[in-house]
Image (spheres, rainbow, N blue to C red):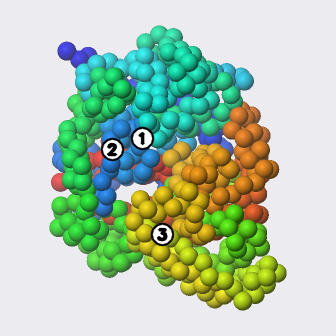
């Protein structure tokens, strides 16, 4: 029989909450910026009729959700898209997690120590945590999960995540039977020693990739046979292109949670169908990516107040291929940035689905680094730069995009702005697979891309999307700048907080000056949430949704 769950150590948790971690470094709460996006349960709920109900969570009910695409997999080691990460977060936990302000806070590890040189992390685990299989979780499961993530057999998209750990590369190359730098001290203490400095290491452990999995659900070749985690909901069924079903895990380690009985997620459901389902009460939460649907619901009194808009974890950009004419000339790239009327695009073209972007990184990262706005709308400056570069008569260029409504509309908005300064853009709508292949090979002269961040870490943007080593790959602008590469490489192994921040500010300044991207807008998380559904938490990272505290009122 499983032991009775205990509450988390309140005094220790209280002490840990006196500090937050930004960018892998511990800072005091006074440093943290206030956020209008903090989600908390209200003390009372005032309904339209004036009735006031005490905010006492109630147990029961099934959370019905839908997606326009297949989640693809429920293996956290390869959870890279937002829908997949959100589902993974329902089943699994990590050592740490992010809060609504993108700070690192405890999860399975209730606390941790970091050595003075920033090279050794010691994590202290919650002691009464059980996997969905009924087996108790220990430090050995942390070691197993991290070694599985690093094993080439797993073919994990997060394979690179733990490269800084001592012995990780040797293990991945088959030169060692284990990762030397991961030591199980006792059942509830695990020590991780780094081989190279890694200022963002702690943030990496907050991603879905670093989830703790149960070996009972893993095959001999490291393949996922059954998703067995420690999360609030346990796996029931996944039918590709149809649905995912989860149910409440009664022995979940956080006392009293979750409140919901089950989760049902339908897949490949068209946005218009989702809206109808939401209106008749067959869907409890709806992600809104079409301005027509947003304005339709806003125009209906019974649904207008159910819509929430919050900052997301990405920035929408145009890639300007630095190795292909005419974008080999920095002046042409800068001209594109000056020519874009971001205010018009966000309000009139995508209908309020995002906010104008004047920095080359998602909002959480831009705030962390204190980046200043750049490239205010100035079509005259754009024409001047084009003339200096020898393009006073403009030029023509093709730009691919995916069929997603707001991405297509964004590019069409840019098309109209660039036409005013003599640049003729031909929009090419492509199937996602063909689009990704073309973009990843650096073949597109201009491209439409959403740059997202799981962990609100500058390295995730500046290294993964702009370092020269990431071509072919996510460096779709084929940006090659030796000074930028050197700064990012130094930042990646820096453990000094101030130096780490300053290096990434320098990297961002180069991106602004060299203009490999034209940043357009920050997509909002736009959701309609049923009036009787409470306690849904949303984040500027990925996952951007958490329902372990969600509940239905009568």
Q: Tell me the SS state at disc 2.
A: loop
The tag earlier along the polypeptide, 3 or 2, is 2
The tag earlier along the polypeptide, 3 or 1, is 1
For image coordinates 51% across by 11% down, the residue present is 185
Where residue 180 sits in the image (x, y, percent)? 57, 16
Q: CA distance from mark 3 to mark 2?
A: 24 Å
Residue contact between numbered discs 2 and 1, judged by CB atoms under 8 Å? yes
* Residue 13 visible to the viewer: no
Of residues 514 and 48, the one drawn nearer to the viewer in this rendering: 514
Of residues 232 and 6, the one drawn nearer to the viewer in this rendering: 232
Is the residue 10 above or below the residue 25 in the image? above
The residue sitting at the right extreme is 388
For image coordinates 21% across by 47% down, the residue present is 239
Q: Tell me the SS state at disc 1.
A: helix
The residue sitting at the top extreme is 186
Q: CA distance from mark 2 to mark 1?
A: 8 Å
For image coordinates 36% across by 20% down, the residue present is 137
Question: Does residue 477 appear to the left or right of 145 in the view shown?
Answer: right
The residue at which mark 1 appears reads as: 78
* Residue 322 visible to the viewer: yes
Q: Residues within 10 Å of mark 3 (few under 14, many from 20)?
A: many
The residue at which mark 3 appears reads as: 401
For image coordinates 62% across by 22% down, the residue present is 166
Q: Which of the image's four quarters has the N terminus?
A: top left
Question: Does residue 268 appear to the left or right of 487 in the view shown?
Answer: left
Q: Any mark on residue 36, and which?
A: none
The tag earlier along the polypeptide, 2 or 1, is 2
Where residue 499 sits in the image (x, y, percent)? 77, 40
Q: Tell me the SS state at disc 3.
A: strand
Q: Residues within 10 Å of mark 2 (few under 14, many from 20)?
A: some
Q: Any mark on residue 73, and which?
A: 2
């Amino acid at each position: 029989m499983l032991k009775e769950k205990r509450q988390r150590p309140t005094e220790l948790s209280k002490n840990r909450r006196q500090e937050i971690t930004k960018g892998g470094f511990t800072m005091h709460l006074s440093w943290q910026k206030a956020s209008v996006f903090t989600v908390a349960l209200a003390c009372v709920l005032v309904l339209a009729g004036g009735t006031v109900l005490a905010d006492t969570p109630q147990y029961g009910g099934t959370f019905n959700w839908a997606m326009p695409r297949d989640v693809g997999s429920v293996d956290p080691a390869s959870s890279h898209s937002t829908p997949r990460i959100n589902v993974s977060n329902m089943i699994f936990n990590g050592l740490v997690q992010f809060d609504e302000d993108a700070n690192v806070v405890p999860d399975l590890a209730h606390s941790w120590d970091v050595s003075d040189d920033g090279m050794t992390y010691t994590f202290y685990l919650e002691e009464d945590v059980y996997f969905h299989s009924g087996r108790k979780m220990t430090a050995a499961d942390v070691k197993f999960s991290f070694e599985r993530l690093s094993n080439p057999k797993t073919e994990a998209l997060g394979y690179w995540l733990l490269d800084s750990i001592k012995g990780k590369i040797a293990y991945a190359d088959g030169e060692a039977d284990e990762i030397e730098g991961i030591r199980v001290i006792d059942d509830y203490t695990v020590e991780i020693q780094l081989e190279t400095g890694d200022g963002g290491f702690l943030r990496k452990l907050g991603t879905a990739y670093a989830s703790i999995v149960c070996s009972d659900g893993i095959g001999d070749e490291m393949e996922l046979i059954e998703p067995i985690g420690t999360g609030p909901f346990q796996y029931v069924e996944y039918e590709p292109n149809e649905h995912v079903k989860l149910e409440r895990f009664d022995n979940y380690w956080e006392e009293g949670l979750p409140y919901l009985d089950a989760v049902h997620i339908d897949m490949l459901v068209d946005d218009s169908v989702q809206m109808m389902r939401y209106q008749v009460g067959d869907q409890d939460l709806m992600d809104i990516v079409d301005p027509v649907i947003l304005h339709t619901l806003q125009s209906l009194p019974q649904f207008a107040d159910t819509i929430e808009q919050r900052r997301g974890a990405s920035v929408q950009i145009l890639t300007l291929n630095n190795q292909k004419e005419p974008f080999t000339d920095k002046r042409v790239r800068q001209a594109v940035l000056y020519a874009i009327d971001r205010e018009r695009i966000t309000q009139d073209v995508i209908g309020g689905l995002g906010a104008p972007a004047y920095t080359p990184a998602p909002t959480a990262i831009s705030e962390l680094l204190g980046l200043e706005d750049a490239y205010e709308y100035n079509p005259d400056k754009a024409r001047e730069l084009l003339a200096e570069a020898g393009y006073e008569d403009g030029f023509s260029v093709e730009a691919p995009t995916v069929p997603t409504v707001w991405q297509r509309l964004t590019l069409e908005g840019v098309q109209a702005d660039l036409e005013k300064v003599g640049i003729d853009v031909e929009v090419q709508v492509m199937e996602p697979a063909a689009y990704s292949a073309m973009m990843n090979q650096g073949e597109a002269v201009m491209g439409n891309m959403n740059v997202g961040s799981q962990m609100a870490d500058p390295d995730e943007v500046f290294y993964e999307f702009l370092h020269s080593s990431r071509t072919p790959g996510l460096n779709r602008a084929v940006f090659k700048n030796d000074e930028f590469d050197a700064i990012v490489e130094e930042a990646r192994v820096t453990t000094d907080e101030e130096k780490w921040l300053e290096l990434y500010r320098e990297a961002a300044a180069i991106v602004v000056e060299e203009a490999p991207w034209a940043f357009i807008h920050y997509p909002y998380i736009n959701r309609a949430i049923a009036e009787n559904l409470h306690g849904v938490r949303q984040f500027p990272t990925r996952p951007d949704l958490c329902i372990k505290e969600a509940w239905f009122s009568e």
